[in-house]
Amino acid sequence: MADPSSYRPKPGEIPDSPGVYRFRDEHRRVIYVGKAKSLRQRLANYFQDLAGLHPRTRSMVTTAASVEWTVVSTEVEALQLEYSWIKEYDPRFNVKYRDDKSYPYLAVTMNEEYPRVQVMRGHKKKGVRYFGPYAHAWAIRDTVDLLLRVFPVRTCSAGVFKNAARTGRPCLLGYIGKCSAPCVDRVSAEEHRELADEFCDFMTGRTNTYIRRLEKQMGEAAEDMEYERAARLRDDIEALKKAMEKNAVVLADATDADLIAVAEDELEAAVQIFHVRGGRVRGQRGWVTDKVEEITTGALVEHALQQLYGEETGDAVPKEVLVPALPDPVEPVQEWLAGRRGSGVSLRIPQRGDKKALMETVQRNAQQALVLHKTKRASDLTTRSRALEEIADALDLDSAPLRVECYDISHLQGDDVVASMVVFEDGLARKSEYRRFQIKGFAGQDDVRSMHEVITRRFRRYLAEKEKTGEWTDGDAAETPATDGNGEIVGTGPTEDDGRPKKFAYPPQLVVVDGGAPQVAAARRALDELGIDDIAVCGLAKRLEEVWLPGDDDPVVLPRTSEGLYLLQRVRDEAHRFAISYQRTKRSKRFRSSPLDDVPGLGDTRKQALLKHFGSLKKLRSATIDQICEVPGIGRKTAETIAVALARSAPAAPAVNTATGEIMEEEPGTMGSSGEPVTMGAPDERRGQET
């Protein structure tokens, strides 16, 4: 535990101006980011008597080892910089949105010749009209299924569309009347685009026009005794009304607004957002937030606004945002929202009427979300805490290992040897800090040497980062080489010290290796050689799920029902999965390699042009330099380089059976010294086994 007075800035050092500040821990990792109208006044609050601080603030300042700040011109700039740094550094003591998932939107691709209706997630694309977001993708599909009766817009993928155009037969939706089948020219591109425009108009709230038009057409069909057509129009009207019921009018003045509600207790807060467009609720989303800092409702609202609109521009930011409490001060936030939208945005608390009633509904949803989350979360928190405590007891650790790193080796009969490093913090996977290694210190299959190399390289980087920041300077403890064992220079030269958590500078409390006593001994030996003695090591053997400790003749056997054993198994299995996926990627890449890959400056486009021109690599190899120059984009110098590369990789002359004079094929066998063919093993025998 650090004493805040040890890193408190001297009087007069902190400027009395707007800015953003960062607290870092002893490993230079950014643990908290905040903004202030006056940096001097705000930071002074952190360096008062610890007994007077909020428990979470006290935990943060005692974890930190330094503080730094950046001065900006305005509070709006401070808001923008704070948002950027929170996204970049992911500080552990800032508000975290655990349910920050990509919500689905109903999208109409108006940028295509034949617009398509589909579910989309992620970043918005230019020329695509979006409606939502929705809480669930199935809610979008239900709405679309109803509307396709009236607006039969294309919903198929590009591959299905091209295949239907090629065969002249539409898909099933085209046969049942839920697609106008532009793929087989039942409608023109202009007619299909009109359908897409009408679909978008209906989704934006212009519903009465289409209902009245269909009712008039139904009446005319009935008068003309076209009863089948009248019945179909009647069903279309019912489908539209049913779709409208899913989005009932909640604000009579056709308002475009977002309503944000917060339900909170001392530890957590639930945020709910209703998106109202054209007076109708078009989407809903929600987050659950850890209150890891002392924070007011207004500050929670500010964080929610940053999360909601930080990546949005234009009409995605509505004219009106209704909230339960205003940020303090509110003017910079309003100005920031107006900058994102490009015009004025009203940020206020609803006081009366329909908007206040709807806000109460959103508030009830937030309260229910918090209750539901706590019901699910209670057992989860208890289980993870118990698992970490059981591991600490079994391995005789001083405290629960809040950060665990696990390593695994993977190869295919000694080829493409790779390793993985996965990280679990507080019992949860932290995928942003996963790492992959190529074993290059030696060739062949040796899991023990591979484990020693990986642990050495990882913790050399750790020591290099400590030395670079001046945190570790004892030259007798261990020699910190200039390279990481892979020829890569580390720890030298001026580099940006930005505190990102994805560096090797943050050490674990426990290193887990996939394997038994030999792998554990190799990992421990690597740490000892580097002079690191404050990191525990254990191994988990697959055969009997035994936990091995360095120097012990017998393993530690945890009960099969132990939560600690389950956590170790999850960590080990995740490392195995990550290593296997990397090894397979390298193997497939090696199998797809070509002699053209060795030609410098020859990209994929010109490679494809060469193969398309000659038809095969064999014909390209037999071509002259002048013939290669005929390919567009290939000059004479490049052609000469290609010819040399192909000549070097040319296969040996075909083997001949001296007894019969028969030319032997290269595959599947090779020739022995006597001229007799030597048959290779069957595919299953040669495949090997992934480890």
Image (tube, rainbow, N blue to C red):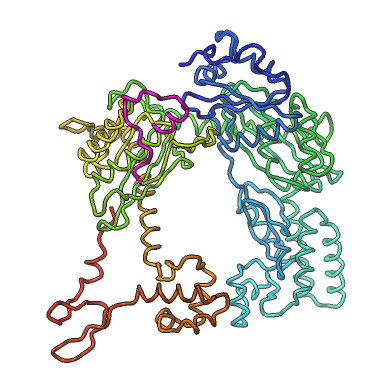
The kind of secondary structure the magenta stretch mainly shows is loop
Residue 243 image position (x, y, % from top left)? 72, 56
Residue 89 image position (x, y, % from top left)? 56, 35
Residue 293 image position (x, y, % from top left)? 59, 23
Assess whether residue 479 is covered by the magenta stretch. yes
| Residue furthest bottom in the image | 660
Q: What residue range appears in magenta? A: 463-486
Q: Count the marks: how many?
A: 0
Q: In this view, does 200 lie above or below 165?
A: above
Q: In which quarter of the image is residue 587?
A: bottom left
Q: Is residue 90 above or below residue 217?
A: above
Residue shown at the point (60%, 81%) measured from the top left: 166
Q: Nearer the viewer, residue 645 or 660?
A: 645
Residue shown at the point (86%, 78%) measured from the top left: 224
Residue shown at the point (78%, 73%) measured from the top left: 191
Q: Which of 224 and 73 is in front in this view?
A: 73
Task: Assign the N terminus to one quadrant of the image.
Answer: top left
Q: In which quarter of the image is residue 385?
A: top left
Q: Nearer the viewer, residue 28 or 261?
A: 28
Q: Is residue 214 above or below residue 361?
A: below
Residue shown at the point (37%, 25%) measured from the top left: 400
Residue 282 image position (x, y, % from top left)? 73, 48
Q: In which quarter of the image is residue 683?
A: bottom left
Assess whether residue 317 is covered by the magenta stretch. no
Q: Image check: 448 left or right of 19?
A: left
Q: Image check: 326 left or right of 293?
A: right
